Amino acid sequence: STPPTVSVRGKTFTTDPWYNVPSNVLASTARQLHLEKDHPVSITRQIIESVFPRPTFKSHNTFHPVVSTYENFDSLGFPADHPGRARSDTYYINASTLLRTHTSAHEAQLFRASESDGYLITADVYRRDEVDRTHYPVFHQMEGARVWDRNTVPGGDIAAAVYADLAKLPTHDIKVEDPNPPFHAERNPLQAGHHSAAEAEAIGAHLKRSLELMVVEIFTRARAAAAKADPERATDEPLRVRWVEAYFPFTSPSWELEVYWGGDWLEVLGCGVSKQELFINAGVPSQLGWAFGIGIERIAMLLFQIPDIRLFWSTDERFLSQFRGVSDDLDLLKRFVPFSKYPACYKDVSFWLPSTSSAAGGNTKANAHDWHENDLMEIVRNICGDVVEDVKLVDEFSHPKTGRRSMCYRINYRSLEKTLTNEETNLMHDTVRKALVEKLGVEIR
Ligand code: PHE
């Protein structure tokens, strides 16, 4: 049932039928792991911030998590029918207010304020998502942006000013693969109405070097931590990174940066040349520049070799004590030593989705047409908290005669803190089964 108002970090909001924030997610808005001294999320933030120094870059780490749909989507050029806006993907307080899904929600306000040439925003972000060891409904992102102003650079020559700033950046010795042209007419267009090719190329070059330097800093520290734990496998091979074309509604051209790590190409961040409409709408049409967004937990997991995203939320001393002192001396960083892994216990739940006819009579329960797996994921999280490691679809079929769809999900129960008893697990599983019937209208098989 929806409370009439909710309070988030000291502010009160009025709900409406769009409200879909479960209480565990609401509670996690208070924690702000990125500001907790010696927490791996906070340490990772410090490492990235060290690559983007003051006074060029100014950090903003306390922006409120509740923003308008305008800030989160419209101000960034997301179309009205973008799937990210769906209630199955995003937590809404009411029809026009939500828990931010990314730190880009704050770009426009900073461009408008124009207080510095660069911005860093670290914040908690919220997404309805699957349940597994790398996904959690709350995580942290850092946004970075760098701007130049046509009215203040010498001679109004943006390209020259950007290349001059690029020349001041350090160099590196990593291997960069960048096979695509700086922009591509269809796949990754230049904003021809706003930027000359030389300007876009200059901004792209500055962006790429800046982020390559960030990756060097992160992965040098990750390697040092890995080498401390296992000196025999230490390596001094040059790091490999590659630039891949990407799409975001608020940058063009856009890229993703991938790093070769542990035998795989790993996607590290998204970025691009900011769409000029953002600056125009923010009242600063003479400015232009680049932006990136990076997921902090993902980087922290490989820096510290943390195997499960739920651990970030642990208040267990066996977790927290391993990072003490690192905020004050980043060179103390070492890999996380997992405390004993408690046994897992999986249980399956099989059910028929409600037939479409049952929804015709004005009943509001989900029907087969609007089955959203995230609804099941959320029910499991609400009932079991952090005791579920992952939830996977293991079987799905349609009845040949009736056309009804049957699904079977496997729920893997494993506490990070103790061995679960059979009774506890059975009780949780039974509660999940009942909630699926009650909330989603499925029929258990
Ligand atoms: N906000 C984007 C995301 O969450 C990342 C991004 C930020 C991309 C800035 C481009 C520029 O995926």
Image: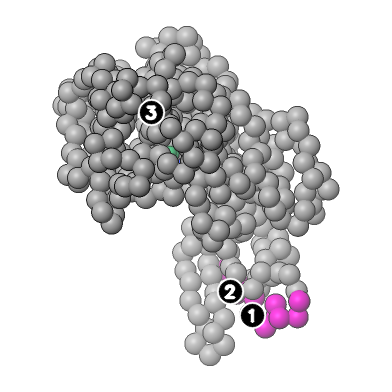
**Mark carried by residue 369:** 2
x and y percentages locating residue 109 in the rendered image: 57, 33
User: Which of these two is toward me, 339 or 5?
Assistant: 5
Alpha-carbon span between mark 1 and mark 3? 58 Å
Q: Give me the residue at 54% from left, 24% from top.
A: 60
Q: Position of residue 236 (x, y in %)?
A: 17, 22
Task: Judge whether 173 appears above or below 445 on screen.
Answer: above
- Of residue 3 and residue 39, the one placed in the foreground of this image is 3
- Name the residue beneath numbered marker 3: 150
Which amino acid, by three-letter code, is at mark 2? Answer: His
Horizontal side, residue 431 vs residue 60: left or right: right
In screen coordinates, is 425 left or right of 320? right
Residue drawn at 52 percent across, 17 percent down: 38
> Range of the magenta residues?
350-362
| Residue 168 part of the magenta-drawn span | no
Disc 2 under 8 Å from ligand 1? The reply is no
- Badge 2 element: helix
Give the spatial CA distance, label 3 vs label 2. Answer: 51 Å
**Which mark sits nearer the N-terminus, 1 or 3?**
3
**Vertical relation: 188 (above or below) 239:** below
Look at mark 1 in the image and give the residue it sits on: 356
State the SS at label 1: helix
Please, which residue is most extreme toward the right here?
4
